[in-house]
Amino acid sequence: AQTVTQSQPEMSVQEAETVTLSCTYDTSESDYYLFWYKQPPSRQMILVIRQEAYKQQNATENRFSVNFQKAAKSFSLKISDSQLGDAAMYFCAYRSARPSGSRLTFGEGTQLTVNP
Amino acid sequence: DAGVIQSPRHEVTEMGQEVTLRCKPISGHNSLFWYRQTMMRGLELLIYFNNNVPIDDSGMPEDRFSAKMPNASFSTLKIQPSEPRDSAVYFCASTYPGNAEAFFGQGTRLTVV
């Protein structure tokens, strides 16, 4: 079974600074997807960024980028120029690319605080 | 598109009562997930459907929980009888063929007193 681990229950960053959230996963599959979701106090789950395992290039979405290390099974999220609105719970997630469909497995989450 | 729609947004019920949570996935999506979120256990997958068929229900806590998807546009999660430890936020999410990420509803906050 696939597992996702986020070893940082809480992180904080100063506004305008950069922060990196860590995530590791365990799988025996070679084709899969990885995601970072953001959950603000409104509790809505918002997709931040996705990465296909077959792609070597790291995904980037504006101020958000990932460092995908397939061999190490590591998938970290970097937030640049942090803003107060980035404060939220961040979840790393894994999903197999099997055509028949598969579960989406989440890590424990990292609570990010942005200090003004 | 209206997104994934869950109802009710909030539910308060007494222990022993039946609770039914509802979900309307995004049109065209063929996979549907039910998750439960608590402080202690985080986000747990309860069950997921593919083309209206339950594929994995290993996360359903016990026989008190049941889920159905009678058609592609509607799913229910039922708890009977409810217990205080069922208090949590329940999310429904859906995804479409060939796409990986799941789109989430706004969740139902269930409180069992």
Image (cartoon, helix red, strand yellow):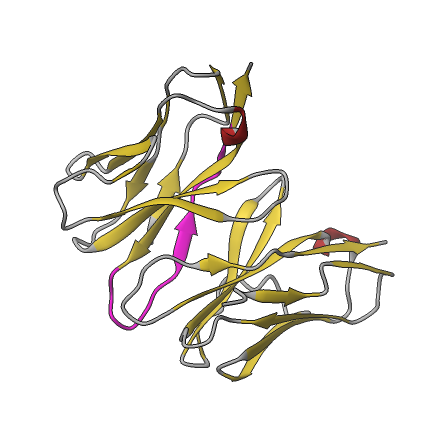
What predominant SS class does the magenta segment belong to? loop
Residue in front for this viewpoint, B36 or A38: A38
Q: Can the viewer see residue A76?
A: no
User: Which residue is located at x 84 percent, y 66 percent?
Assistant: B16
Query: In screen coordinates, is A110 left or right of A75?
Result: right
Start and end of the magenta stretch? A97-111
Residue in front for this viewpoint, B17 or A46: A46
Q: Quadrant of residue A25?
A: top left
Q: Is residue A102 magenta?
A: yes
User: Which residue is located at x 14 percent, y 50 percent?
Assistant: A54
Image coords of residue A112 (percent x, y): 51, 26
User: Which residue is located at x 63 percent, y 40 percent?
Assistant: B39
Image coords of residue A63 (percent x, y): 34, 30
Q: Can the viewer see residue A103?
A: yes
Up/down of A16 relative to B35, above or below: above
Residue in front for this viewpoint, B57 or A83: A83
User: Which residue is located at x 63 percent, y 38 percent?
Assistant: A41
Q: Is residue B62 magenta?
A: no
Going by the picture, which residue comes out furthest to the bottom?
Answer: B70
Image coords of residue A35 (percent x, y): 35, 46
